[in-house]
Image (cartoon, rainbow, N blue to C red):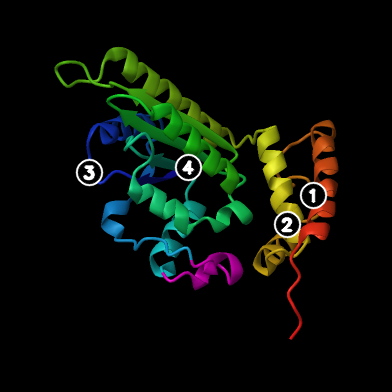
Amino acid sequence: MKYLIINGSPRHGHTWEIVTRVKNTLSTTDTNTTFTHVELIDENIPYCRGCFSCFENGEDSCPDSDKIGPIVDKIRECDGLIITSPVYALHITALLKNFIDHVAYLYHRPEFFTKKALIISTTAGMGHKKVGKFLDETLRNWGFNERFKLCLIDVHDTNGYLPLNIKEKIDKTTLKFYNSIESKKLKSPSMNALFMYNMWRAMAYNNHIPCDHDFWVENDLINHEYHPSIPCSFIKKMPCKIFYKLMLGFLSKNSVKKEEV
């Protein structure tokens, strides 16, 4: 299996020790395992300008597409994503937030519906749950089918070693992550995922942003309450059918029309 590790920390500290344990467990479980590393500190990605070009003109028009595009391609190519961030000021690091800002178009144009991810975060105090929740929500909006979390507090004993209970938790979550990928089974989406999908779908249908419309039409997503490769019962989709029609009505009445010149 091919794993991509996106390291949001500027150094290899406590969070990286968890990554090392995860890598060892995955490598022991499957001897054909390979890892690709993206150290965001070394990518020297400029701050997102908020120019909106990725939305309006496509992600290739981003001023930093030469740095962002290859990382997104690596996500497409991997079997599993491992994404890390220690807690900085009760949130993710600026490095990781900057990368996420650059790929904000993935909220509008989600594509990783068959992918699985492992989120790793550590803290000496608090904020680990908030970081885990934010990254889980972000990856869900990118389309990720299943996300596993290792969000830990005070992960070292007084001698600087990982306690046995922490090691067991890391190994248990890592094996769940591995087994989910290896089985190739896809989970039914949560109601939050369904509603967000249908909100972007309605905006795309309404041609709110032409690039979004083209993406949803070209990938045959516009006619589905969720990605057709993901199992989802008719009953579960029913509220989204109603929500989608309500969104279409709302958008048709509230879209700003350009003035003809």
**Image point 82% across, 36% down: which residue?**
239
Q: Which residue is mark 2?
A: 203
Q: Which marked residue is nearer to the observer: mark 1 or mark 4?
A: 1
Q: Position of residue 186 (x, y in %)?
A: 64, 36
Q: Amino acid at mark 2?
A: Met
**Image point 44% across, 27% down: which residue?**
129
Q: Position of residue 57 (x, y in %)?
A: 58, 72
- Indicate the quadrant where residue 141 lies: top right
- Asked if residue 227 lies left or right of residue 137, the reply is right
Residues packed near mark 1 inside 10 Å, few (<14), some (14 to 19) or many (20 plus)? some
The local secondary structure at tag 2 comes to helix
Front-most of residues 97 and 171: 97
Q: Which residue is mark 3?
A: 11
Q: Position of residue 230 (x, y in %)?
A: 70, 41
Nearer-N-terminus badge (4/2): 4
Residue 53: within the magenta? yes
Q: Residue lying farthest top?
A: 165
Marks 2/1 in contact by CB < 8 Å: the verdict is: yes
Q: Which residue is mark 1?
A: 247
Q: CA distance from mark 3 to mark 4?
A: 22 Å
Q: Residue lying farthest bottom?
A: 261
Q: Which residue is mark 4?
A: 80
Query: Magenta stretch?
Result: 51-63
Q: Position of residue 10 (x, y in %)?
A: 25, 46
Nearer-N-terminus badge (2/1): 2
Nearer-N-terminus badge (3/1): 3
Q: Amino acid at mark 3?
A: Arg
- Indicate the quadrant where residue 159 lies: top left
- Asked if residue 141 lies left or right of residue 96, the reply is right
The local secondary structure at tag 3 comes to loop
- Asked if residue 190 lies left or right of residue 165, the reply is right
Front-most of residues 245 and 122: 245
